[in-house]
Image (tube, grey):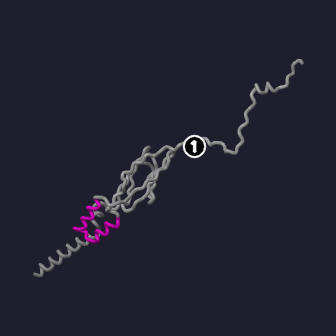
């Protein structure tokens, strides 16, 4: 009988350890992770990418490992093209909601809290991001200021012949 008591304690300990482990990481955290590959392409390719949360890549197309948790802005720049800034949202996705439902079975309240705060239930939208850059327009020549004197016209040869004194016989 003493053998059975020890076995029961071991089984109870194992079940407790499994339950604790499951509750420390939420289901979405385990299945989806807290980061995702954020992909950026541009037309034309070769634009530099910078995000408002400190990530970047030198030239499109590129993929950046980004946290799922927060929204951010993305700015693309390329010589000869106007810079473009776009917003990326972070919102609960279908896969994240399924992970949260898994917490009801395994992770419990602690798993729900973990998934709810670390962004693992979220997806970034849009992802992938495809951006069309607009060519910069060359500046037109500047008009002269309104108070500038008008350029003087050069006298025409006919006008100077008509006004020149006559030297012929009288």
Q: Is residue 16 left or right of residue 63?
A: left
Q: Crowdedness of circle 1 by 10 Å Cα count: few (<14), some, many (20+)?
A: few
Residue ID for mark 1: 139
The x and y percentages for residue 96 are 29, 61
Q: Does the magenta stretch include residue 106?
A: yes
Q: Is the magenta stretch mostly helix, strand or loop?
A: helix
Q: In which quarter of the image is the N terminus?
A: bottom left
Please indicate whether residue 107 sits to the left or right of residue 84 in the image.
Answer: left
Instruction: Determine the secondary structure under disc 1.
Output: loop
Quarter of the rendering occupied by the C terminus? top right
Q: State the residue in front, 23 or 150.
A: 150
Is residue 60 shown above or below 73? above
Q: In which quarter of the image is residue 150?
A: top right
The answer to whether residue 146 is left or right of residue 155 is left
- The span shown in magenta is 95-118
User: Relative to the observer, which residue lies in front, 114 or 151?
Assistant: 151
Please state the horizontal and vertical placement of residue 57, each as a whole percent of the image.
44, 53
Q: Where is residue 32 in the image (x, y as percent from the top left)?
A: 30, 60
User: Residue placed at 66% from the left, 42% from the top?
Assistant: 144
Up the image or down, 35 lies above or below 16; here it is above
**Residue 34 appears anywhere in the view:** yes
Of all residues shown, which one is farthest toward the left?
A: 1
| Residue 21 at least partly seen | no
């Amino acid at each position: 009988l003493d053998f059975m008591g020890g076995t029961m304690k071991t089984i109870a300990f194992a079940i407790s350890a499994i339950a604790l482990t499951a509750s420390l990481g939420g289901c979405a955290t385990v299945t989806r992770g807290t980061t995702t590959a954020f992909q950026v392409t541009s037309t034309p390719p070769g634009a530099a990418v910078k995000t408002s949360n400190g990530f970047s890549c030198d030239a499109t197309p590129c993929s950046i490992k980004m946290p799922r948790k927060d929204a951010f802005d993305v700015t693309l720049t390329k010589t000869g093209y106007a810079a473009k800034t776009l917003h990326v949202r972070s919102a609960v996705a279908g896969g994240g909601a399924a992970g949260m439902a898994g917490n009801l079975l395994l992770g419990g309240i602690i798993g729900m809290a973990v998934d709810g705060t670390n962004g693992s239930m979220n997806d970034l939208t849009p992802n992938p991001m495809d951006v069309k850059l607009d060519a910069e327009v060359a500046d037109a020549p500047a008009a002269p200021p309104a108070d500038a004197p008008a350029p003087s016209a050069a006298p025409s040869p006919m006008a100077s012949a008509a006004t020149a004194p006559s030297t012929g016989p009288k």
